[in-house]
């Protein structure tokens, strides 16, 4: 009787270890998402994003599901986006594009633009441009970030226009900063 119980316990333990081994990347990713939701330090957030990005090719369905769920935290969706861009940029761009459609909440559109810019995705340039005149500061900030990351001649022209004409001083400062990073403006540069 004791041998049978020991065998069942050992078999159950081996089965549990096998399940954990098979699902390890998903468990690591879920743990990373949980950590993101419970972390406020910028350096820790970046480290967690890197960890999720490194296992991205093992958890593609989870990354897609997380990004598509607009109720997920911005940190989770951002980590999923960054990992997807590493794994398969074309697939990630196709995942992000529907969120640029009219009718989505402004914060969802802003995040999609930011996510596309994070890796300098030039293939969707024309899909982003209609938002240049958005009344939403977050969307315009995301466009400034995007334009600064794609580093195309037209991007520099648009950033210069934004630096001179945007109604928000913060957006003008962001545009000047991106132009500085691109080497177009000297450092430091005072925005008026």
Image (cartoon, grey):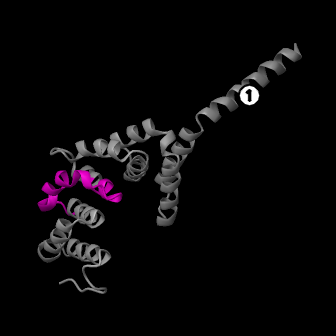
Q: Secondary structure at mark 1?
A: helix
Q: Is residue 38 visible?
A: no
For the residue pair 60 and 10, the one nearer the viewer reads as: 60
> Which residue shows up at 30% across the image and 58% down it?
117
Q: Which residues are magenta?
A: 113-137
For the residue pair 76 and 93, the one nearer the viewer reads as: 93
Q: Is residue 98 visible?
A: yes
**Image quadrant occupied by the N terminus:** top right
User: Quadrant location of residue 21?
Assistant: top right
Q: Is residue 9 above or below residue 117?
A: above
Q: Is residue 64 left or right of residue 156?
A: right
Name the residue furthest front: 153
| Magenta span dominant secondary structure | helix
The residue identified by callout 1 is: 13
**Image quadrant occupied by the C terminus:** bottom left
Q: Position of residue 115 (x, y in %)?
A: 32, 54
Name the residue furthest right: 2
> Which residue shows up at 20% across the image and 45% down it?
104
Q: Is residue 119 magenta?
A: yes
Q: How many marks?
A: 1
């Amino acid at each position: 009787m004791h041998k049978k119980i020991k065998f069942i316990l050992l078999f159950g333990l081996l089965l549990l270890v096998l399940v954990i081994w098979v699902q390890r990347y998903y468990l690591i990713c879920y743990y990373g998402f949980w950590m993101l939701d419970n972390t406020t330090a910028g350096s820790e957030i970046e480290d967690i994003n890197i960890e999720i990005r490194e296992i991205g090719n093992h958890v593609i369905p989870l990354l897609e599901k997380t990004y598509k769920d607009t109720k997920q935290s911005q940190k989770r969706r951002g980590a999923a986006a960054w990992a997807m861009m590493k794994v398969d940029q074309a697939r990630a761009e196709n995942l992000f594009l529907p969120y640029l459609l009219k009718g989505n909440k402004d914060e969802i559109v802003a995040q999609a633009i930011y996510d596309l810019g994070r890796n300098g995705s030039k293939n969707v340039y024309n899909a982003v441009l209609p938002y240049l005149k958005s009344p939403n500061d977050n969307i315009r900030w995301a466009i400034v970030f995007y334009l600064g990351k794609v580093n195309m001649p037209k991007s520099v022209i648009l950033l210069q226009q934004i630096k001179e004409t945007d109604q928000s001083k913060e957006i003008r400062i962001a545009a000047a900063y991106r132009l500085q990073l691109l080497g177009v403006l000297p450092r430091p540069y005072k925005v008026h």
